[in-house]
Amino acid sequence: MSLRSFLFGEPYNKELLELKNFSAEYEVEVKTEISTELGEDLGGYIMECRYLLDQTIRSNEIVNTIDQKDVIIKTANKSLENSIEDLIAIIKISPSYQVARRFSGEIFETRNAQELSRDWEKAKTDLIPNLFKTANERIGFKLSYEKGLLHTHIALKNNWHYLLMLPEIYCFKHYDDPIDPSKTSIHTFKSGLIPEINVDYCMVASSISRNNDVINLKMKSQITNGDNLTKLDANGTKFNLKNYSFRVEAEYDISVSSGKVLLASANLLEKLDKAINKTVILLNLG
């Protein structure tokens, strides 16, 4: 027990949970909603995915393999149907990722880069010519995708589909500490309302409790680049952080004895005046 715990009656920081090898199947549902300042609905969608996840604990890292088995996207907006078919095809270019994580849970490397490159080379001849009508569209997409391949681990680190399965919470304190709360590393959110805006944020523990073998952890976002955001111009107008808000709220139920996520959710909400960009992600152990 630490001296501070002894003197002030505060719990010492033991391990939050154990980490063990496991395999699991997850079902993920994503609901999106975008509306303009005038109340115009730009069309959202519902995405349903099924993933197989394998976790192996090594001496200096955690290795996870994630295989996407199914993906279905639905929308009530008829004008989006063709775009959604294209999106499904793009998602299926690389259905499997293997990543290495630190013992905090943070992704730091993609381990199947050669496989991802082979998937992409095949897609360039079999898929991309049928998705884009003009040469400029094909070239633009190829440049963007190949640039992303170099930083796949960063894209996964910023994607809540994967953050719910691969949480960054293993080094969190096992008790609430309002003065010095546990935090994740910094993530980046690309605005759905203002193309010029990238929001950097970390997730901060807001509540933690335990019921037998299950830890319930709640977190909320904390913007880390607020000063830089106020210096940006958006659509020719000085960006005012007072008119803009962004927040993420996440909750996990996690097995104490293995580190396996049993249930998780994330709510992302972005607002600019009356315009709204909203995403709700739910993860269930299949």
Image (cartoon, rainbow, N blue to C red):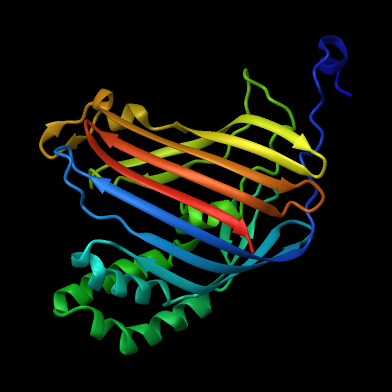
Question: Picture coordinates of residue 241 (x, y %)?
Answer: 28, 26
Question: Picture coordinates of residue 150 (x, y %)?
Answer: 43, 65
Q: Residue furthest left?
A: 236
Q: Is residue 125 above or below residue 229?
A: below
Q: Is residue 68 above or below residue 194?
A: below
Q: Going by the image, does 62 lie left or right of 237?
A: right
Looking at the rendering, in which quadrant would you find the C terminus?
bottom right
Q: Name the quadrant containing residue 137.
A: bottom left
Question: Picture coordinates of residue 211 (x, y %)?
Answer: 78, 38
Q: Residue furthest bottom?
A: 126
At 53% from the left and 36% from the top, the residue drawn is 203
Looking at the rendering, in which quadrant would you find the N terminus?
top right
**34 and 231: which is toward the camera:** 34
**147 and 271: which is toward the camera:** 271
Q: Is residue 70 above or below residue 21?
A: below
Q: Going by the image, does 227 lie left or right of 164?
A: left
Q: Name the quadrant containing residue 121.
A: bottom left
Q: Residue furthest top?
A: 7
At 79% from the left and 46% from the top, the residue drawn is 256
Q: Name the quadrant containing residue 133.
A: bottom left
Q: Is residue 207 above or below residue 25?
A: above
At 10% from the left and 37% from the top, the residue drawn is 236
Q: How many marks?
A: 0
Question: Picture coordinates of residue 11 (x, y %)?
Answer: 81, 23
